[in-house]
Image: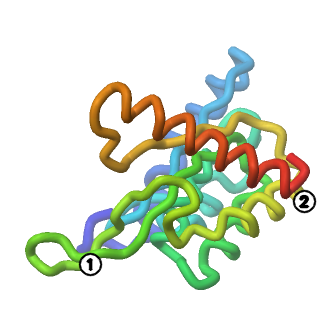
Amino acid sequence: YVDNKPIIAQLQALRPAVAKLADLNKKYQVGAMYHTHSGVNLVGASFWDLHILMDGMDPNAVGVNFDIGHATVEGGLGGWINNFRVITDRLRGVAVKDFLWGKNAKGDWQPQWKPLGEGMVRLPQFFKMLAASGFDGPLQMHFEYELGTPAQTKEYMKRDLATLRGYLAQASL
């Protein structure tokens, strides 16, 4: 988004391009996933804007890759829950990662990405909601924290995979 224009007008200006992509995807029987991020002036950070942007379009042609880490950055207390509920009918993929709030060198608050289960993302609750939604699409693990040496990277990834599998089993996914 740009600051000097109304957001709804900016979304309306984007809709024809998204509709064209949806039509092209439908023609070739493929689907696009808009990966959600967090941050100022980013389309999709609030999720309701994706609903407006894609409303009326085939969710199999253009959908959402819901990043629970970024969703929690944007709405840690309960906004991520509402965002999930807004976008569930367009859910095509899920990205998983964890974080804690921390200060950078300038003293500004920012997300600090962590191994799964070591942050503030309510993964057990999220996966129960995901199971209840009937989701059966792809799930990706994102490693945005420092992984170290190749040997450490392998160990961290194995640990996060085991943690993820535990959460999935608890949610019967």
- Pick whichever, 48 or 149, lies toward us: 149
* Residue at 64% across, 61% down: 51
Q: Nearer the viewer, residue 151 or 37?
A: 151
- The residue depicted at 75 percent of the width and 43 percent of the height is 59
Q: Amino acid at mark 2?
A: Ala
Give above or below for 96 relative to 84: above
* Secondary element type, mark 2: helix
Dot 1 corresponds to which residue? 109
Residue ID at (67%, 39%): 139
Amino acid, disc 1:
Trp
Q: Which mark is residue 132?
A: 2
Q: Position of residue 169 (x, y in %)?
A: 84, 49
Check disc 2: other Cα within 10 Å, few if <14, some if 14-19, many if 20+.
few
State the scheme by which the image is colored. rainbow
x and y percentages locating residue 18 in the rendered image: 55, 41
Q: Earlier in the sequence, mark 1 or mark 2?
A: 1
Q: Which quadrant would the N terminus be assigned to in this image?
A: bottom left
Where residue 145 sits: x, y (%)? 36, 50
